[in-house]
Image (cartoon, grey):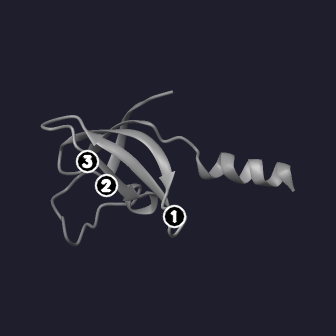
């Protein structure tokens, strides 16, 4: 049904746009959420706010994941990327 499909798309593409701090200290801006054309998995499209301002994609689940405290025991940030400023 058309309404269910529209609701599915609204939830799927919920915006997470904004400026984020990576747990290693660098800053990035999330430009959009997209779908991998092969798997239909959500990916986050984000850009460095330093250096060459390179554009990256990372699957949404990993982007929003917690820092591996066993691998990085000295890191105080809870999540891999933490929202600093939300963009509308």
Image coordinates for residue 35, horizontal then vertical, percent: 51, 56
Query: Which residue occupies the extreme right position in the image?
Result: 1
* Rendered image quadrant of residue 68: bottom left
State the CA–CA distance, disc 3 to disc 2. 6 Å
Q: Determine crowd level at label 2: few under 14, some 14-19, many 20+ residues with C-alpha closer than 10 A.
A: some
Q: Which residue is mark 1?
A: 41
- Could you say which is closer to the camera, residue 15 or residue 21? 15
Of mark 3 and mark 2, the one earlier in the sequence is 3
Q: Are marks 3 and 2 in contact (CB under 8 Å)?
A: yes
In the visual, does 76 lie left or right of 44? left
In the visual, does 20 lie left or right of 76? right
Q: Which residue is mark 3?
A: 22
State the CA–CA distance, disc 2 to disc 1. 19 Å
State the CA–CA distance, disc 1 to disc 3. 22 Å
Q: Which residue is mark 2?
A: 80
Residue visible at 38% across and 40% down?
30
Image coordinates for residue 78, horizontal then vertical, percent: 32, 54
Q: Determine crowd level at label 3: few under 14, some 14-19, many 20+ residues with C-alpha closer than 10 A.
A: some
């Amino acid at each position: 049904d058309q309404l269910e499909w529209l609701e599915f798309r609204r939830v799927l593409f919920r915006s997470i746009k904004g400026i984020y701090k990576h747990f290693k200290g660098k800053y990035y801006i999330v430009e959009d959420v997209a779908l991998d054309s092969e798997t239909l998995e959500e990916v986050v499209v984000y850009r460095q706010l330093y250096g060459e301002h390179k554009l990256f994609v990372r699957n949404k689940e990993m982007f929003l994941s917690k820092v591996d405290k066993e691998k990085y025991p000295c890191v105080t940030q809870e999540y891999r990327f933490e929202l600093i400023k939300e963009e509308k």
